[in-house]
Image (cartoon, rainbow, N blue to C red):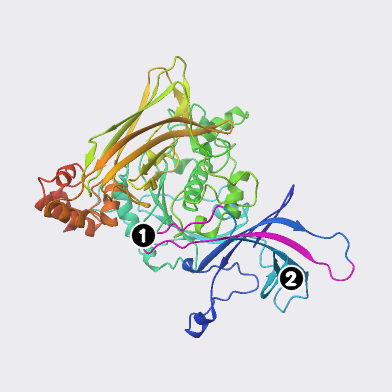
Amino acid sequence: MRVAKTDAGYAISGDTYRYSWIDILLGHGIPTFGPTTIPIYARDRYNSYLKVTGVSIPRLAIGTCRIRLTVEEYDYTQPAAGAFDGTFPTAPSRTMDIYLTPVTPPAGYAGPYFTGQVYISGVLQTTMSVTLAWASAMFRRATVEVHTMTGSVAPATVAGEYFNTIYAKAKWDLTVLTDPNPVPVPTTVPPTVPTNSWSSSALHAVMTSLSDFASVNLDTTWYMHVLIVQAKLGSGRGVMFDTINVPREGVASFCEDGYPSNESAWFGAAANKQQKDVPRAFLRSCTHEITHGFNQIHQENEGGADNSIMTTTPSVANAIHTAGGTFPDGITLDFNEHVRHHLQHLPDPIVRPGGMTFTAGHNGIPVPSEDEAGPDDEVVEHPALKLNLKLAKNRLKIGEPLEMKWELLNVGSDPILAPNFVGTEYDFAEIRVTKPDGRTMDVAPFVIVCDASQLTDLKPGEGREAGQHLFWSTQGFAFDTPGKHTIRLDVAWRADGLKIGATASMEVLVDHPVTPHDNDVIAQMMDPEVGKFVALGGHAYHLKSAVARIGKVVREHHEHDVGKCLTGLYDGKQAAAIGK
């Protein structure tokens, strides 16, 4: 359990993992940890989340002093095979009263030690008991490994601050490792010039090839990979992939990107400089990307932009200026209270690498604070904004990616603060698909551009455009059944406690397969590796299984609707050249 003292009392949360006597008999022993070690258990053993709603500590006691904790337990349903997002119920699975009695700790334990009894509905549970031993002043532990590509420069310690000291402020014990072997510049995957902006597919290929990914066991350690590449100004400063092999295990930071003056008028001495030449801002930006890897989102979409780690860099510069300071000296190398609370008290599967996918679990998880619970707010539509959604077609085959384009337009007479980028990868646009049976699926972005988005003036008559191929995300395939599907697009942000923006929706009819060609195309295309290929924007030739499947469709079914739509995503000659 994680116990934090607050102005109002205590914020206490915990996680349980399930093992049985059968596990012990079969040799699947329960992992053991030293008295001062923060434990880490296997992901598939996760059992439930605990939220303490009441703490009673008597000021005076006759006889033995007993502390009472009122605890809500939320049982976790593990995801299906091949998936990552399990579910928590919206209401407690049960509520318990735990009575704790302080006792003398065994040898090796240096802090408070309690044993306790459990009551449910006032009835003592004779088959349950509790032991609590103080382990650490830190709440969680993780490892970050920094990989630097040849020609690149990694962030350095700034005035005694580094990733580990910043995370210590959130009570995380973070170990930082440096890969001693420079990552070679790829020769078979564009860009061969590392100072170009990197395509998602090229960067994903490099990160997939890092040898450490195969050797790390995410069931025994929380491990995050950080790849430093060069890139250039205007590339977004960094990205996170929702999945390399599993969710949220790798981020990238661009050392020769930086602080273009067109992104903020308040970059000060850092304006138009590269990240590697502005150490404090570079450390902040790279920490921002790492924290995306631990499933934290932009503050423009939560409490509002401020001078903290999870606000995007241009908005930080603006916030510092508003407060009378200067960028980069005024950068606060710390999380705000909201993100710190999430890092401390969200359930393990949400924050740990290899757990739930990006943004999953943020809405409706009852962490111990009044303002954390509840479903996501509905969008309050701005009267001067119009969202135009266009689909390449309104009738699809199963296995066919759907090209979407949209524009956020100011139809009013005054400028409006609105997102500077409206693609899903910039964290302001969200897509949801309602299937024929009424089920809904959120289409999570596969690539998250970590640090480029902000709210800027959208002038009257101006619009901002984006688009993507809607096909697959880490939540599954958008169009996997015949019938009518409804696509809803929201572009929204938080202001004055509300979720403000614009919405649009359109319907798509998905045909039943009727020919052998249809069935063969479905067999090739409805594969998660093909989904990744499309989600990366196509041309992800390092995904060999996907290349083989798509190549078969293009060669054998080039007149089929699916074969035709793959033209802009796949080049047979390029695939063959890279495959050599």
- Residue 88 in the image: x percent, y percent? 52, 56
Q: Which residues are magenta?
A: 62-90
- Decide: is 304 above or below 160: above
Which residue in the structure is indicated by mark 1? 245
Closer to the chain start, of discs 1 and 2, is 2
Q: Give left or right: position of 184 versus 514.
A: right
Q: Is residue 524 above or below residue 266?
A: below
User: Can residue 88 be found in the magenta stretch?
Assistant: yes
Q: Magenta residues: mostly which secondary structure?
A: loop
> Does the magenta segment cover residue 185?
no
Question: Relative to 523, is 45 on the left or the right?
Answer: right
Three-letter residue code for mark 1: Asn
Mark 2 Cα shell of 10 Å, populated few (<14), some (14-19), many (≥20): some
Tell me the amino acid under the disc marked 2: Phe
Residue at the top extreme of this rendering: 413
Q: Is residue 242 left or right of residue 187?
A: right
Residue 339: assigned label: none
Q: What's the residue at 52%, 30% (across, down)? A: 268
Q: Quadrant of the C terminus?
A: bottom left
Q: Residues within 10 Å of mark 1 (few under 14, many from 20)?
A: some
Q: Secondary structure at mark 2?
A: strand
Q: Which mark is residue 114?
A: 2
Residue nearer the viewer, 307 or 22: 22
